[in-house]
Image (cartoon, rainbow, N blue to C red):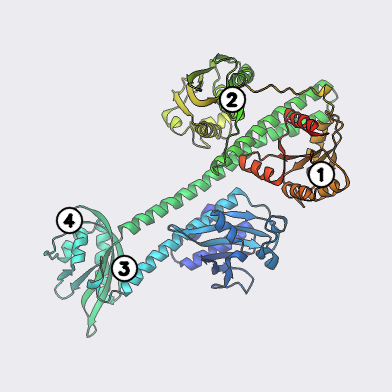
Amino acid sequence: MSFLRRFHNIVSQQNISTTEKIQLLLKFGLEIFDLEIAIVSEVTDATYTILYVESDNAELTPQCKFDLQGTYCVHTLKANKALSFHHAGNSDISKHPCYTQFQLESYIGAPIRVANRTFGTINFSAAKVSQPFTAEHIDYVELFAQWLGFELARIESEVRLRNNYKTLKKVEQVAAIGSWRVNMSNQQVFWSNETKKLHGIDLNTTPSLSEWVKFIDSELYQQKFLHAVSHSKNDGESWELEFPATTQDKRKIWLSCHGEVESKDGGCINLIGSLQDITKDVLLREKLKDQKLEAETLLNERSLLLAKISHEMRTPLNGINGLLLNAMDEPEQAKVTENIQLALRSTEILTSLVNEILDFSKISQKGLSLTYHHSNITRIIYDVVELSKQLANKKDIEFSYSIDLPPQCWVKCDPVRLNQIITNLVSNAVKFTDSGGVELRAYSKERQPDIDLFIEVNDTGIGMSSTSIKHLFDPFKQGENEVGSHFGGTGLGMSIVKELIELMQGTIEVHSILKHGSQFKVCIPLTSAPEPKAKTLPSTKEFDASKLAVLVVEDNDINQKVISAFLSKFNITPDIAPNGKLAIQQCEQSTYDVIFMDSIMPVMDGLTATSTILDKGLVAEHCQIIAMTANTDELSQKHFAAAGMHDILPKPIDFMTLGRIIATCIEKTP
């Protein structure tokens, strides 16, 4: 049974209390996350109070109180979002009081929000090291927290209403709540002025019971009301009923009606009660239902995304694995080379998929940023043209282009992201065009002292309907239903393109007719820049860096071989350290000119190792420490610089980038 089905089966049960539902959810969560302790807490100031708990530890009981700073939940509340870690002892929080006192290794939790305030947390933990938590696990715990927020808000609302009723000894005295009375002997009705105001009738008017019923919308609610009155008269029980009503002046409202029996000599003489306008509460309740449905829809979309990404990534992975296995047993060198070239092409496809997923993740976290350089946009577009020719040739379609730009059009921009935008638009056009051709136009208009860059991509492909255009930039959407299955892809490309264009303060327009092709028009404002002084990188044949003493700190055996092979082309044979702790020992014994430092490693990560090496003065002043990482966003760059790293070598490793770094290190080495 799926997670959502089991979740729904628990929360939709009408024959159990909220407390029972919460306990079932906590047990369900322990099963899903494979942990040992489940807690719903309330946090007031610096005090953490257990409200509900599922654990074999008898010391953990409801109303147990702890110092908030001594719990992992302090990080969850500070981040204001779901957090998780599966091995606390091997993380930055290994000195946290919750770890030092209770040795809790695994934790996943989310803040519970009630209305506009943070109520507390729901969290699951264990003393054992668990498997790493996935994005789905984060979605699950956030859905738990959201439902709890809705339920606690509903309970608080009900408690408020009940407290109001208890204080209504004389409902006439309660402001904004109307009172009513029905004489059971003659069916005469009395409405207070507040009740008359609620229904919008004249204060001098006294309705009959039948006239009252007519204010209630729908026959169903009218029958419920009459049944409650009759049942209360016969059995002497109090009742509460919510129903929609239409006032005399045609306003649609919701009313909460409370009724009780007034007895004398064992018989019912009157029914008395109160009426309250609960329209806002009902609307809020409906809003919470919509939000819950939206959360469930998002969870379903995330599951579909994972399935789609899994399918798309397995294709190039299968190619890489199969082609390399074939190359191992292939006696002919030409076929070995061909297999390796095809495997490299599969790695490019896989890298492109990973980059799309990472970019979308940055968009979701508002972390996508630009890195500005002085760039020649004419050269960037001609690079795209050359790639596009190859893509079009493979599909045997025509590719034409028109570039009306100055030969030396230097601007301040992010060249990688600009290339990504244009390449994605052209490759998409080629992808969805089986006959005819694709045209790329690039031109500029002066906007003294700067320019506006215009990019137009036209194709004779499958085109799009108006509905597809409407959802074109939504993630995971690929137009008509059959498009995704026929053409493949994650459906993230166009949403990333739009985000990048807007990040550059630009615009994108789309015109398309189904089965008659599409046109994309992009305008990006760019700041003019002077042409920088040319820097040349010598070829590897004359690029001898053998004088450099190099240390590579990398835990992955394959990555060790990859960078060692690249460095050998510069006549460098590096020392290897598999983690930060051993790197420190190497620096204590040898002097290095360059250290390539992986950022994430077991035992000790690259940031900690770098800070320790510099603090202890284990390297010469000219030594360059280079971060090796797949995280090249602006925030990561700040963290690397703060630790003392001088540059970044992105993964997968680009040979030209490595050459630039080596050249810089040679210049700085005495």
Q: Amino acid at mark 4?
A: Gln
Mark 3 nearby-residue class (10 Å; few <14, some 14–19, many ≥20): some
Label 2 to label 1, Cα distance in Å?
A: 43 Å
Q: Quadrant of residue 403?
A: top right
Residue 423: mark? 2
Q: Is residue 1 visible?
A: no
In the picture, the disc for residue 240 is: 3
Q: Are marks 2 and 1 in contact (CB under 8 Å)?
A: no
State whether residue 247 is above or below residue 413.
below
Secondary structure state at the residue bearing disc 1:
loop
The CA span between labels 3 and 4 is: 23 Å
Q: In terms of sequence position, does the residue under pointer 3 or pointer 4 come before the other?
A: 3
User: Is label 4 in a helix, a strand or a loop?
Assistant: loop
| Mark 2 touches mark 4? (CB < 8 Å) | no
Mark sitting earlier along the chain (2/1): 2
Earlier-in-chain disc, 1 versus 4:
4
Please tell me whether mark 2 sits on a helix, a strand or a loop. Answer: helix
Q: Amino acid at mark 2?
A: Thr
Q: Residue at x 54, y 73 (%)?
A: 63
Q: Are marks 1 and 4 in contact (CB under 8 Å)?
A: no
Residue receiving disc 4:
248
Q: Residue furthest right?
A: 589
User: Viewed as shown, does residue 567 lie left or right of 634?
Assistant: right
Where residue 630 sits in the image (x, y, percent)?
68, 39
In this rendering, would 318 be left or right of 583? left
Front residue of 126/403: it is 403
Name the residue furthest left.
204
